[in-house]
Image (spheres, helix red, strand yellow):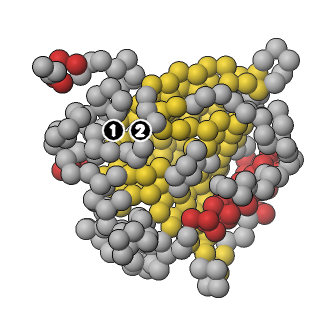
Amino acid sequence: MFDPKINREYSDSPAVDFSKAREMKPYLSEPKAMYVGCPGKHGFLDLGFELDPDGKSILRRLNRRAPLVVQQELYFDESMPDMPCVYILSSGGPNVDGDRYRQDISVGKGAKAWVSTGAATKLATMKYNYSGMVQNITLGPDAYLEFLPEPVIPHAGTRFICDTTLTVDPTATVVYSEIYMGGRKYYNGGELFKFDILSVCSHGRRPGGEELFREKFIISPDRANLRDTGVMGGYDVFANVIVMTPPDKMEQIYGRTTPFIDPARRLAAGITHLPNQAGLLFKVLGMEPGPVKEVVREFCSAVRIAVKGVPLPKEFPWR
């Protein structure tokens, strides 16, 4: 008979530890089916981008554990044809009870990369435990990374925690985006803001260990009204974009970005400086993911123009 307690060390993936996250303590029961972090539920992805001898950016290192999948780099960006583009996929469907993921992405000196997901990340209903993900993103001197995943969609009763560390050289630029929907808006009469908890934390630091900033938001609809003014108000979708870049580029981007509230399109966006001259924080609110993604891409295009001198191409029609 299979005894899961004997096989808990099966995975050679790095540990994903959220034991210090007090907000997740109510959700520590062992799932009745597959246990926390068992094979197939402890995903690991390690991507390393570097320059080859000819000065071309390539995916030099690829290490993966199911259910996270990356096949190979592609070069489809016409405005930056020498930049490798990678899609992160999952062979396991939505995140479920007890899933633990870790994603490590590094971009070496002078290299560049674009990373996204193949589809939206869906968070299934969870009865016992939670789904957690750790991300470590590291950029060397003059490196450039655009990390623009598709939206996260929480189902009713889901619990999710994500902790991201951005370790960025002062000469490098990273664009880190995350888009969260309020739920499955049109499913079974609507599931907006019926999840249990979303805990999202981002840290910025320098390679020497200097801490630059930390932003954390814990969203628990049972404890607070997310429709309040200053929270979500009448909006259903939230986007958060962190840009770490040198100060001169930061001011160019800031000067070209106009905050707005557009009642006709039901969109709003704002921008602020991160502490310690680290970069910028851009936020978007909207009703549907498509228009929010458009605003995020417009902002990311302004970043690319300031840093690389070229805009983002138009999004693929099927995205």
- Please name the residue shown 47% across and 54% down the image: 152
Residue 234 at x, y = what percent? 47, 80
| Along the viewing direction, whichever of 177 and 272 lies nearer the viewer | 177
| Along the viewing direction, whichever of 6 and 295 lies nearer the viewer | 6
Local packing at callout 2 (Cα closer than 10 Å; few below 14, some 14-19, many 20+) is some
- Please name the residue shown 78% across and 56% down the image: 314
Q: Are marks 2 and 1 in contact (CB under 8 Å)?
A: yes
- Please name the residue shown 22% across and 33% down the image: 35
Does residue 185 sit above or below 93 in this rendering? below
Residue ID for mark 2: 92
| Along the viewing direction, whichever of 205 and 91 lies nearer the viewer | 91
Q: Is residue 276 visible?
A: no
Q: Comparing marks 2 and 1, which lies closer to the viewer?
A: 2
Upstream in the sequence, badge 2 or badge 1? Answer: 2
Left or right, residue 259 beside residue 28: right
Q: Amino acid at mark 2?
A: Gly
Left or right, residue 48 beside residue 186: right
Residue ID for mark 1: 99
- The residues tagged by marks 2 and 1 sit, at their Cα atoms, a distance apart of 10 Å
Left or right, residue 220 beside residue 93: left
Q: Secondary structure beneath disc 2?
A: loop
- Please name the residue shown 30% across and 31% down the image: 37
Q: Amino acid at mark 1?
A: Asp
Residue 180 at x, y = what percent? 48, 59
Outermost residue toward the bottom?
A: 264
Residue 25 at x, y = what percent? 20, 46
In what quadrant of the picture does the C terminus appear? bottom right
In what quadrant of the picture does the N terminus appear? top left
Does residue 253 sit above or below 173 in this rendering? below
Left or right, residue 237 beside residue 92: right
Outermost residue toward the front?
A: 1
